[in-house]
Image (spheres, rainbow, N blue to C red):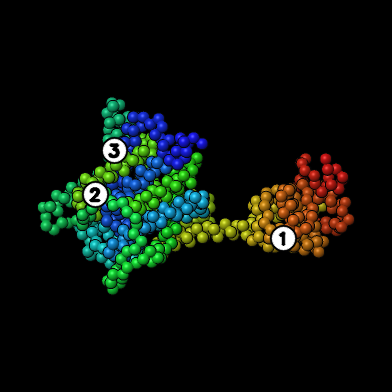
Amino acid sequence: MSLRECGYRLLPGLKWLHGYTGQDAVADLIAGVTVGLTVLPQGLAYATLAGLEPQYGLYSAFVGGIIYAMLGSCRQVTIGPTALLALMTSRHTGLGLASGPAYAILLCLISGIVELGMAVLKLGALVDLISLPVTVGFTSATAVIIGTSQLKGLLGLRGGSGSDFINTMRSVFGNLNNVRPGDFTLGLTSIVVLLLLRKLKNVNLNGRITNLRAQQLISGGIWVIATGRNALIVLVTSMVAYNTCEQNEDCPYILTGKVKSGLPNISLPKFETTILDKNGTEITQNFQQMFAELGPSMLVLPIIAVLGNVAISKAFGGAGLSATRELIALSMSNICGAFCSSMPVTGSFSRSAVNHASGVRTPLGGCYTSILVLLALGLLAPYFQYIPKAALSAVIISAVIFMIEFEVIKPLWRCSRRELLPGAITFVMSLAVGVEIGLLLGVSADVAFLVYRAARPVLTVYKLQTSHGINYILIRPKHSSLYFPAIEWVRSEISKALATHGIAPVVLDCAHVHDFDFTAARGMGSLQKELSKANVPLFLMSAHKDIGVILKESTNIDFPTIECADDLEFLLEQTPEYCLHLQISTPLVESRLVHCDAGEPTELSKLNGNTS
């Protein structure tokens, strides 16, 4: 392997530099700045959602872009803070004193380590255990929780937003008499304007403006305004708040407050912190107590981050992308980010869509976004204090309402109503108990359905007749495998078939069965012995060679195999121990003739002495 190939494997981002042109740089610059204008207000808002000071959202927004540019493989993906991870982080940041940032940064480090472990062990396929209905139920529930958690900021109510849906709603309804008209009016107006600006990009000017140049300029201006709507709302509301609060002693808006200026300190995450107990006493927690507090979030949050990032990568980059490579890029973004005071990050679908629509050509567009965020930290941080919290709540609410996917319910109801149950369990339990428990219960319900299908395979039972009038019972499994939970079910169904249709040879159609496990094979041996005692022959039809080997090695029984009903007929007539009194005259449920195809030697050809 050459040095260049080795470099490309270690740092895939180097491939983008090969042949990088000025046009690529301009396209990436435009896309990077556009995404930067989106991530600045979102970063401030998501940090507030996570229960942290606003600057932590910006700390989380620049490291991922640089790391992903070097290690990532999808040019559209942007790494940074998201509403979902901010919500999950907020569960551990309300313990008082300086424990909030300490927990968020430690959770970021642990998430990166877990994701790196998944990449090394190639466990990215674990996210496949989370079905689409469960994912929809989870994201919809988190969208509702995030939206309700911002009602306090929207209504101008004091106190933290929290991540508990029921308690948040109880607190909001209990304090409706304390709603601040200024915040409510500003927040509601911001939501309406944001939704209108979102629709603005769908305006079609074809045929309305004859001048092509003017049409392009107007369309470009509309697109810029619609794309940068969050930054525009934050800028306008900040100017309104500045003018209002500077002129009046009693400010009608709750403002973000002072945002720390400058770059974050590069240091190890803290493995010890101080919290306040219920009595207001300071308590020092060591790393074991911090790990105990984080609990399931140390596993659930990385899995959710991986699920989102891989989904975004596949959506924009196609199925050819390496999930392991994406895992490595995401894990290193979190690990390196933890040394720069970042909270957990992952790919953002909304910002990735903006990046794609902006015409990004390489992942280096993320570097331009990071530079813009760093400039904002160094130059604009003092002005962030005038951003109304109601405006940030409006930014979050207008973004998450589109995460609620009602449109999936109708096709699921039509196609697979069974799959609605895991999604409904996930949605309801996430709201009632918590997102981690809701996700776990939803996945458990899905796995339970899979186990049930393995334990109760669909068996089609036919009462058929050969061309010479010999009746037999055909059992046809619809699944490709028969494992140990299913064998008793198969034995029971064969007994029911004999009781229903009378005594007749039993043929198990193995054309679609490709695997037996040891327990199932031993069960088949017991079944064969039971049927032999009742003078009922059991045949395997169209069985694969591997099936015969497994059954022979497990039971020491040579199961007679046939290729079609003609073989069955000849065996019953030529083999003395198969009595012809097995033929019965019960009316047939279904009758048909089955013809043999040329192929491997069957029991019929063996009896004829022809194995050619």
Q: Are marks 1 and 3 in contact (CB under 8 Å)?
A: no
Q: Which residue is mark 3?
A: 224
Q: Residues within 10 Å of mark 2 (few under 14, many from 20)?
A: some
Q: Position of residue 278 (x, y in %)?
A: 30, 72
As drawn, the label of residue 522 is: 1
Within 10 angstroms of label 1, few (less than 14), some, or many (20 or more) residues?
many
Circle number at residue 262: 2
Sequence-wise, the earlier of marks 1 and 2 is 2
Q: Is residue 9 above or below residue 475?
A: above
Farthest residue to the bottom: give it.
279
Q: Quadrant of residue 551?
A: bottom right
Q: Which mark is residue 41?
A: none
Is residue 135 rendered to the left or right of residue 606?
left
- The three-letter amino acid code for the residue at tag 3 is Val
Q: Residues within 10 Å of mark 3 (few under 14, many from 20)?
A: some
What is the quadrant of the C terminus in the image? Answer: top right
Amino acid type at mark 1: Arg
Q: CA distance from mark 1 to mark 3?
A: 69 Å
| Amino acid type, callout 2 | Gly
Residue located at (84% from left, 53% from top): 572
Q: Secondary structure at mark 3?
A: helix
